[in-house]
Image (cartoon, grey):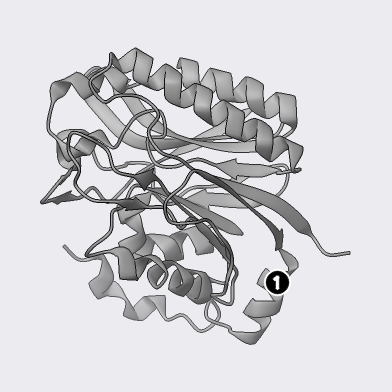
Amino acid sequence: MARTVKCGLIQAKNAAPTDAPIEEIKRVNIEKHLGLIEQAAKQGVKILCMQEVFTTPYFCAEQQTRWYEAVEKIPNGPTVKLMQETARKHGMVIIVPIYEEEITGVYYNTAAVIDADGKYLGKYRKNHIPHVAPGFWEKFYFKPGNLGYPTFETAYARIGVYICYDRHFPEGARALGLNGAEIVFNPSATVAGLSEYLWKLEQPAHAVANGYFIAAINRVGYEAPWNIGEFYGQSYFCDPRGQIIAQAPRDEDALVVADLNLDMIREVRNTWQFFRDRRPETYDLLARE
């Protein structure tokens, strides 16, 4: 019998005015996502991921200290606790991308991973932090991740997380494969323009190079007052052959659901022996400054 797991991705527009109190913005966005999680549960989704910093707009479009109020502890903050209850209720693995506070003044772009029984399994901190004009001022908000490229053995699959800008770096994508990831989730916030043509190029290439599934999530819509561009959605699942097997629309809230046949990983790796044929002893240059 095929080892198949039904997975889901949520892409959504920011649901609150960006000038509202931070706690109100978070409350409204969390309520919206809880409704979408209920829809996923009704469809039998077993692993679910939301978009980058899902509780807020993509505030990195400006450099304002007010957004430091959006941080939460992981795992002891309210959003992760709520998602633990939600995961337990539905028997669903949930990846929860939020703005994390380690200590006051030390903040990360992080995704918590919660197992189907509600147990907190660990977290991934975004390693590659952009600071790119116009409107991607992430170094103002986030320290680079310091937890490496962990993978998490969940009730249904071993998964990894790679966040947004990380996807431009094949080294971490390879590390996730070597660490045993069967599915890599990439919660993102990316706009039309320079990177859009890469959206369906880089991540299928990672899937092929490493023989795993990719789940790519992007938010949708325009976010005033910044209007740095259109968050173009098109969240998708990609199989280890690099084929996109399910995809969301460009411009609307969506729940993307796909059945991932994890047996395909062995089938593909038995054909393309990239891990066998690696030559790490020749790659010293990759680790130099």
Q: Secondary structure at mark 1?
A: helix
Q: Residue furthest right?
A: 1
Give the image quarter of residue 203.
bottom left
> In this orientation, which residue lies closer to the viewer: 157 or 44?
44
Q: Quadrant of the N terminus?
A: bottom right
Q: Is residue 32 left or right of residue 86?
A: left
User: What residue sits 26% from the left and 25% below the top?
Assistant: 18
Q: Is residue 225 left or right of residue 287?
A: left
> In this orientation, which residue lies closer to the viewer: 254 or 83?
254
> In this orientation, which residue lies closer to the viewer: 20 or 218?
20
Q: Is residue 98 left or right of residue 180?
A: left
Res. 118 in view: no
Q: Is residue 135 above or below residue 235?
A: above
Q: Which residue is mark 1?
A: 264
Rendered location of residue 253, percent (x, y): 49, 43
Rendered location of residue 27, percent (x, y): 43, 17
Q: Is residue 197 above or below residue 104?
A: below
User: What residue sits 58% from the left and 27% below the top?
Assistant: 34
Res. 139 in view: yes
Q: Amino acid at mark 1?
A: Met
> In this orientation, which residue lies closer to the viewer: 278 or 139?
139
Mark 1 neighbour density, 10 Å: few (under 14) some (14–19) many (20 or more)? some
Rendered location of residue 213, percent (x, y): 58, 63
User: What residue sits 48% from the left and 24% below the top?
Assistant: 30
User: What residue sits 33% from the left and 81% below the top?
Assistant: 282
